[in-house]
Amino acid sequence: MTLLYFILPALLAGLVQGLTGFGSGIILMIFLPALMPVAQAAGVAGMTMFVATAWLAWRYRKALQLRQLIVPFIVYSAVATVSVPLGQLLDTGVLKRLLGGLLLVIAAYFTLRKSAIHPYP
């Protein structure tokens, strides 16, 4: 029965990820902290979606353009190296405000960029 508490949120997260392209971690982090400590829940959520992402990368490997992946990978690696230790040091309230600010910046970017307003030239 306990395994069901992990499988159902993972399936829901996979569905959301497949339909929208993001959000699996959000869905998993709604459920998993009720079952385990937050740090472990984040690890489980990350590994769960790593498997899904690896499967998609393998499936679409012929369409991947590695040159386009280099810069995002370097940026992600640098930010993750700083943010993971910082996440354990900062207060939860500060982290919530930082996340809210990041989401506002991302929303503004996608709202104001030209291709979002006129997707077809």
Image (cartoon, helix red, strand yellow):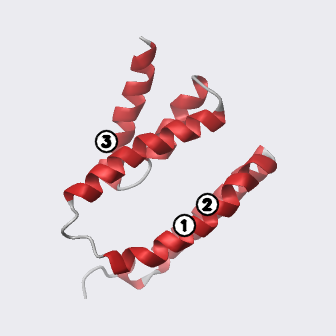
Does the CB distance between marks 3 and 2 fall below 8 Å?
no
* Furthest residue in direction top, as rendered: 1
Q: Earlier in the sequence, mark 3 or mark 2?
A: 3
Circle 3 crowding by C-alpha within 10 Å: few under 14, some 14–19, many from 20: some
- Dot 3 falls on a residue whose secondary structure is helix
Horizontal and vertical percent for residue 73? 48, 70
Horizontal and vertical percent for residue 84? 67, 53
Circle 2 crowding by C-alpha within 10 Å: few under 14, some 14–19, many from 20: few
**Labelled disc at residue 84:** none
**Nearer to me, 43 or 105:** 43
Name the kind of residue labelled 3 in the image: Leu
Location of residue 24 by image quarter:
top left
**Labelled disc at residue 80:** 2
Residue that carries the numbered disc 3 in the rendered image: 15
Up-down: is 4 above or below 115? above
Horizontal and vertical percent for residue 53? 35, 52
Q: Quadrant of the N terminus?
A: top left
Name the kind of residue labelled 2 in the image: Ala
Does the CB distance between marks 1 and 2 fall below 8 Å?
yes
Residue located at (80% from left, 49% from top)? 89
Q: Quadrant of the C terminus?
A: bottom left
Residue that carries the numbered disc 1 in the rendered image: 76
**Which of label 1 and label 3 is nearer to you?**
1
Name the kind of residue labelled 1 in the image: Tyr
